[in-house]
Amino acid sequence: MRHAILGAGAIGGLVGTVLGSLGEDITVIVRPEKLAGYPGTLSLERSSGTITAPAKAVARLTQPVDVLWIATKTYQLQAALDAVESAPNTVVPLLNGVDHVAALRSRYGHDHVVPATIAVEAERLAPGRFIQRSPFVRFNLGAGAEPLLGPMAVRLTNLGFTCQLILNEQTLLWGKLCFLAPIALVTSASGKNKGEFYADAAWKGKLDSAVAEACAVARADGAEVNLAKLQETFDGLPPTMRSSMQKDLAAGRQLELDAIGGPIVRGGERYGIAIPTTSDLIATINAAVDNKNSRKA
C-alpha cells in the first residue's frame, strides 16, 4: 500500500520507518525548506537494533495514497493539512487529545477518518533519523480500520508492537488521554522523571488524583476506562521516563497543553465533575511557560 506521513517528527518517523521496513511504500511530507536535504532512507534506533527503510520526501502531497498518517502537533494540524492536495482514501490521525477527530471528519468525511492512538517514548535525532526510547509501543486502532489495516497490525506485533482494534472510539481516544494527560501534566509541573516523582509522596498523590479525575470525565463522555489497569501501566514505566510535554517545556517549545489537558477541563465543566488537581497542574505549567517567556523578553 501507499502511505504518506504528515508530521515527520518522532511519532511520524517511527511509524514511517516501521511500515517501510515491512515493504510498504512510504512518502514523507516535509517543509519546503527541508526537502533538498531530506534523506532517502529512514532509520529508527531500537534496543533490538536499527531499522531502516526507503522513503520519498515531498513538500506537497499531489498523488493519491491509500493511507495518510497524521502525526503533527495538534496546534500544527490545520496549517500542515494545506500540504495535502490529493485526498487520501483513509486518514489515520495519531494526534494527542480527542477534538481532532471531528475536525478531520468535517474535512475528509466521517468514514474516511479512522482514529488511532500510539503510546511510545521516541525522539527525532535528525531529519530521517529517530530513536525509540521506551521498551514498548502500544498502538490502538478504531475497529473501522480492520479491513484495510488489520493484517498490518498483525505484522506490527512481530516488531514488538502491542496492537488492538477497539470498537468504542471514545474508549480508544480517552483510554490514551487518561494515561497521557496525568503523566504529562505531573512530569511537566514537577520537572521530575517517573522515578523521581514516584519517590515523592506528594507528587505521586497528584498523579493518582489526576488519573481519577481524567477517568471520571472519560466515563461521563461514554468511554470505558479501567483505573486499575492504568495504574499497572504507570507502575511499569521505566524510572527514567520523561514526557514529551516535559521535554518541550524544558526546551522552550510550544506545548500541547490545550489538546492534552483541555478535554478534561472542558469535560469537567460539561458534566459537572470537579477536577482540582488537573486544573492546578495546568496552572503550574502555564506559570512556568510565562516565566520562561518573561526571561526571553
Image (cartoon, grey):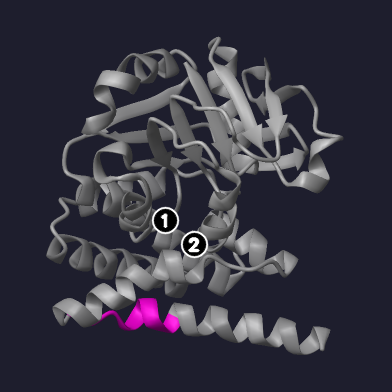
- The prevailing secondary structure element of the residues shown in magenta is helix
Q: Is residue 16 left or right of residue 166?
A: right
Q: Amino acid at mark 1?
A: Leu
The answer to if 278 sits in the magenta stretch is yes
Placement of the C terminus among the 4 image quadrants: bottom right
Q: Relative to 94, is 190 above or below?
A: below
Residue 229 in view of the camera: yes
Whole-percent x, y for residue 197 in the image: 52, 64
Q: In this figure, which residue is indicated by the disc labeled 1? A: 180
- The residue located at (44%, 29%) in the rendering is 67
Whole-percent x, y for residue 246 in the image: 60, 63
Q: Is residue 31 left or right of residue 141?
A: right
Q: Relative to 177, is 28 above or below?
A: above
Q: Relative to 209, is 276 above or below?
A: below
CA gap, disc 2 and disc 1: 6 Å
- The residue located at (23%, 32%) in the rendering is 144
* Number of disc labels: 2
> Is label 1 in a helix, a strand or a loop?
helix
Q: Are marks 2 and 1 in contact (CB under 8 Å)?
A: yes
Quadrant of res 214: bottom left
- The residue located at (43%, 18%) in the rendering is 156
Quadrant of res 106: bottom left
The answer to if 179 sits in the magenta stretch is no
43 and 245: which one is in front?
Answer: 43
Q: Is disc 1 surrounded by few (<14), some (14 to 19) or many (20+) residues within 10 Å?
A: many
Q: In this figure, which residue is indicated by the disc labeled 2? A: 184
Q: Relative to 263, is 10 above or below?
A: above
Q: Is residue 37 left or right of residue 249?
A: right
- The residue located at (36%, 79%) in the rendering is 277
> Is label 2 in a helix, a strand or a loop?
helix
